[in-house]
Image (cartoon, rainbow, N blue to C red):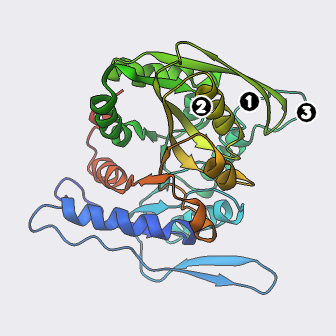
Amino acid sequence: MSSLHTHRMAIFSCEASRYFAEKVVEAMNRMRSEGDPEVVLGPLELARFSDGEFQPSFAESVRGATCFVIQSTFPPSDNLMELLLTIDAAKRASANKVVAVIPYFGWARQDRKDKPRVSIGAKLVANMLQAAGTDALMTCDLHADQIQGFFNFPVNHLYASFDFLSILQGLKKKFKDTLTIAAPDMGGAKRVNAYAKNLHTPVVICHKTRARANVVERIQPIGEVEGRDIVIIDDIIDTAGTLTEAANELLRRGARSVRAFATHPVLSGPAYERIDASALSEVYVTDTIPLDPSKKDLQGKFRVVSLADTFARMILRVYNYQPISSEFPL
């Protein structure tokens, strides 16, 4: 693992993603070759002040190291600020390179001006990461692929499809010719077409109209629904309004079963309650964002697919300057 590199590897995690970083480090140790040193999660301390201000600091030297800092930037915004301060601290401590590992890249839905006088939040976050001293980014399932162009440094963009496909192939064997892949809205058409092509299944596209933000007015499925076992695929579940309305409408139109696969379980507001009461039989999500422990009684339909092994492989490949294209099955 270290033979191709002159700088030592250092793995750190901010507070919100420590649960994920621990799994990544465990996976990296399973993958290391005999004789390679054990990978450990470095000590990162966070001092908090009474007014809410905080200051991260490294409890060991990172001089000359290639630092991977793991943190998803889901709400609250303190998670993003902690990541920025940690990157800044690493650069000021003479780290050779800092790679921001952001499994869930927040503000990605603000990728353009979709109405007058609004910000482009994804571009602003990209600028902030560069200003902090980030040398490269590793993330998963950006809401829009073109966000990669907002960065002036390398972006290693991973996809949950690598981990989802094996489960979907199992469903294909179970349901055979009735399995159908669906998009919850027109924006997801490209994503579901890639899955459907790989699995050799038909596609359903749900045409959605909104009354206002986070409020779905009407959903019209396009494609054959009756008698089908449908899998809805998306990148994010936020309030779950679109997802559950789509699932309920598909069942009303004769679908035999409806499941969902989504990479990032933001799950804000009434999301858990909506999913629990919906026509969805199962909801597969990843661990880029942790499920809310206070909603444990509403998690019966959830199946968590860990991306720790995928990120562990990618970190090792990036560290050793190896290609990552083999990790993209779609």
At label 2, the amino acid type is Ala
Q: Are marks 2 and 1 in contact (CB under 8 Å)?
A: yes
At label 3, the amino acid type is Arg
Quadrant (top left, top right, bottom left, bottom right) of the N terminus:
bottom left
Q: Residue at x 61, y 33 (%)?
A: 247
Query: What distance separates the C-alpha of mark 2 from that of mark 3?
Result: 21 Å
At label 1, the amino acid type is Arg
- Residue placed most toward the observer, 180 or 195: 180
- In the figure, 180 relative to 6: above or below? above
In the picture as drawn, the residue positioned furthest to the bottom comes out as 50
| Callout 3: SS | loop
Check residue 117 in the rendering and tell me which mark sits there, or answer none.
3
Q: Are marks 2 and 3 in contact (CB under 8 Å)?
A: no
Q: Residue at x 57, y 56 (%)?
A: 133
Query: What distance separates the C-alpha of mark 3 from that of mark 1?
Result: 11 Å
| Callout 1: SS | loop
| Callout 2: SS | loop
Q: Residue at x 30, y 24 (%)?
A: 176
Sequence-wise first label, 2 or 3: 3
Residue 64 seen by the camera: no
Check residue 25 in the rendering and tell me which mark sits there, or answer none.
none
In the picture as drawn, the residue positioned furthest to the left comes out as 34
Counting from the top left corner in percent of width and height, residue 256 is at 48, 29
Which label lies toward us, 2 or 3?
2
Which residue corresponds to mark 1?
112
Quadrant (top left, top right, bottom left, bottom right) of the C terminus:
top left
Sequence-wise first label, 2 or 1: 1
Q: Quadrant of residue 273?
A: bottom right
Check residue 144 in the rendering and tell me which mark sits there, or answer none.
2
Counting from the top left corner in percent of width and height, residue 87 is at 55, 63
